[in-house]
Amino acid sequence: MAHPKISPTGRERTFGDDELIVSKTDLRGAITYANDVFCRVSGYAEAELLGQPHNLIRHPDMPACVFQVLWDTLHAGQEIFAYVVNQARNGDHYWVFAHVTCSRDPAGNVVGYHSNRRVPYADALPKVQALYAELRAIERSHPDRRAGMQAARAVLDERLQRLGISYSQFVFSLSEHTRLGAAA
Amino acid sequence: MTTSSDFIAEAARICTRAAAGDLEARILHTPEGSELAALAQAINRLLDVSDAYVRESAAAMEHCARGEYHRPILLRGLSGAYRHAAGTINDAALKMKSDAETIARFEVERAAVARRVAETTESVMASAEHLRTTTGAIRTHVGTTRQLATEVAGAGDQVSHNVQAVAAACHQLSACTSEITRRTRESAELTNGAVGEAHKARTAVSDLGEATRKIGSVVDIIGKIARQTNLLALNATIEAARAGEHGKSFAVVAAEVKNLSRETAQATERITGQIDAMQGAAHNVVTVIGGIGESIQRMDQTATAIATSVSEQASATEEIARRIADVSQATKSISGKMAEVAQASQALEETAVGLTTAADRLGDNASALKHETAALKSGSAAPVAVARAA
C-alpha cells in the first residue's frame, strides 16, 4: 500500500519512562492493535493505524538490514530487542527500545506479532546512532536497495562475529541499564 | 461499537478472555473522548502491562534456561507489583548466573582434574606395564642367577674336592721329596765314604809300591850278595883246586855255594820281575782308583745337584701346597657366598613375584581408575543439567 511521503522535521518526540508503546500485527505485519500511547506519540488515530502495515511509521534513518534481522529472528520464533527510530505522522521522530515477540495460540502456533516499546536508554543511543548511520550509508551507496541491505547486513554480521556475541547480546550490551544486576 | 451496552458486553468478553489467559484480547474501535473510551484505554493498559510482564518474564526465564544471562526483565515501563516481581526474577536470574559461573568454573577445574587424573592414570598404567615387564625380566635374570650360583657353588665344591686331592698329592709329593732328600743325603754320605775309602786305597797302594820298591832294594842287596857269593864260591873253587885232594870236599861246598848263589840270583831276578809286575799292577790300581774317585766325585756332584733340585722342588711343592690351601680356602668362601647368592636370589625371586602381583593389581586399579575417569570426563553435562533444573 502506497503512503504519502512524509518529510522528516528533525523534531524529536518523547514519552514517559513508565509508559509502553504497544502494538500488535497479524502474520503479514498489518496492525491489529495500537494502544493509546502509540496513537499519542505517533500522532495517528486508532482508526488510521488498524489494518495498516507497521512500516507506516518507519523513519528513513532506519537501516533496512536491522528490520531484516528483526524479521529473521521473529521467523525463527525468537524475541528481538532493537533500538528503533520511528517517524510520527507529521514527520517528527521518536526513539524507542522495541521488544518484539511472537503471539501464539494455546497450541503454540504463531498467530501474530507483538511489540512493546520503551523509552530508550540514553547511554546506548549515541552508539546506536553511529552504527545506524554507518549501515544506512552502506545501504545508500548501493543503487540496488536489496544489494545495499545485504552489504550492510554483512558488515553487521561480521562485526558481531568479531565480537563473538549474538545480536541480542549486542543490543543488551549497549547500555549499562540493560545488564543483569543493573536492569532499570 | 454502536451502543454503550454493546461496548460493555465487548469489554466483558475481552476481560473474560484475558482472565482465561488470552492476552491477545484488546478492546478496539473505541469512540474518542467518551467515558467508555477512558474505560477501554484503562482495560487495554491493564492488558498491555500484564501482556508485557508475562512476555518479559517468560522470555527472561527462557534465556536463563538456555544458560544465557545477558537478558534481564526490563523494569522500565513496569510499575508496582509488576516491577517488584520482575526485580525478584532478575535477582533470581543473577543468582542463577552466579551459580552457573561457579559450576562452569568447577566444571573447568573438574575437567582439568579429570584430565590430570587421566594423564596420571595413563602414566601409572604405563609404569605398571613397565614394572610388570621389568619384574618379569628380573625374575628371569634372578632365576638364571640362582641357577648359575647353584652351578658355581657345585663347581666350587668340585674345585674344593679337586684342590683337596691336589693338596693330598702335594703332601705325598712333599713326603716323597723328603725321602728323596734323605736318600740323596745318604747317597752323598756314602759317596763321601767311598771317596775316603778310595783315597785310603790309593794310599795303601802307594804304600804297597813303596814296600815293593823297598823289597826291590833288599832284592838288589840280595842279588849283590849273590853275585859276591858267586865270586867267593869261584874264588873258593880255585883255592880248593889248589889245595888238591884236601880241597876236594871244599870244592864240592864251593860248587854248592855257587849253585845257591846262582839260584839266588835267579830268584832275585824273578822277584825283581814280580816286583815290576806288582808295581805295574799297583800303578794300574792307582789309575783305576783315580778313575773310581773321579766317578764318585761326579756322582757326588750329581747327587748334590739332585739334592739342590729336590730342595727347590720341595720349596715349590710347599709353595704349591700353600697356594692350594689358599685356593681351597677361597673356593670354600666362594661356595659359601654362592650359596648365599642362591638364597638371596630365591628371596629376590619371591619378592619379584610379589612385585609382579602388585604391578598387576596396580595396572588393574589404573584401568579401573581410567574407566572411572572416562565417566568423570564425559559426565560434564550432569551437574549443569541439575543446576538448570534447579
Image (spheres, coloured by chain):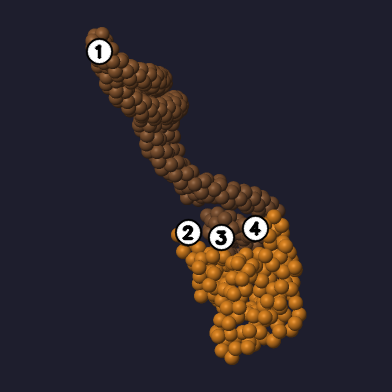
Residue A173 visible, this angle:
yes
Badge 1 element: loop
Mark 4 in CB contact with mark 3 (< 8 angstroms): no
Q: List the residue tagged with mark 1.
A: B244
Q: Nearer the viewer, residue A4 or B297?
A: B297
Kindly indicate the quadrant of the structure image that contains residue B130.
top left
Q: Are marks 4 and 3 on the same chain?
A: yes
Among numbered discs 4 and 3, the one appearing first in the sequence: 3
- The structure residue drawn at horizontal position 54% and vertical position 65%, both measured from the top left corner, is A78
> Residue at (55%, 63%) from the top-left corner?
B24
Distance from the alpha carbon under mark 2 to that under mark 3:
11 Å
* Mark linked to residue B72: 4
Q: Find numbered disc 2 in the image and state the secondary structure of the residue it sits on.
A: loop
Q: Is residue A33 above or below residue B155?
A: below
For label 4, count other residues whose C-alpha is less than 10 Å away and answer few (under 14), some (14-19) or many (20+): many
Say whether mark 4 and mark 2 are on the same chain.
no
Which residue is tagged 2?
A106
Badge 1: few (under 14), some or many (20 or more) residues near its Cα, within 10 Å?
A: few
C-alpha distance separating marks 2 and 4: 25 Å
- Seen at 55% across and 54% down, the residue is B65
Chain ID of residue with mark 3: B
Indicate the chain coloured orange by its letter.
A
User: Which amino acid type is marked by label 3?
Assistant: Leu
Which mark identifies residue B23?
Answer: 3
Mark 1 / mark 4, whichever is N-terminal: 4
The amino acid type found where label 1 is placed reads Gly
Chain letter of the brown region: B
Q: Are marks 2 and 3 on the same chain?
A: no
Residue B278 screen position, x and y as percent: 31, 23
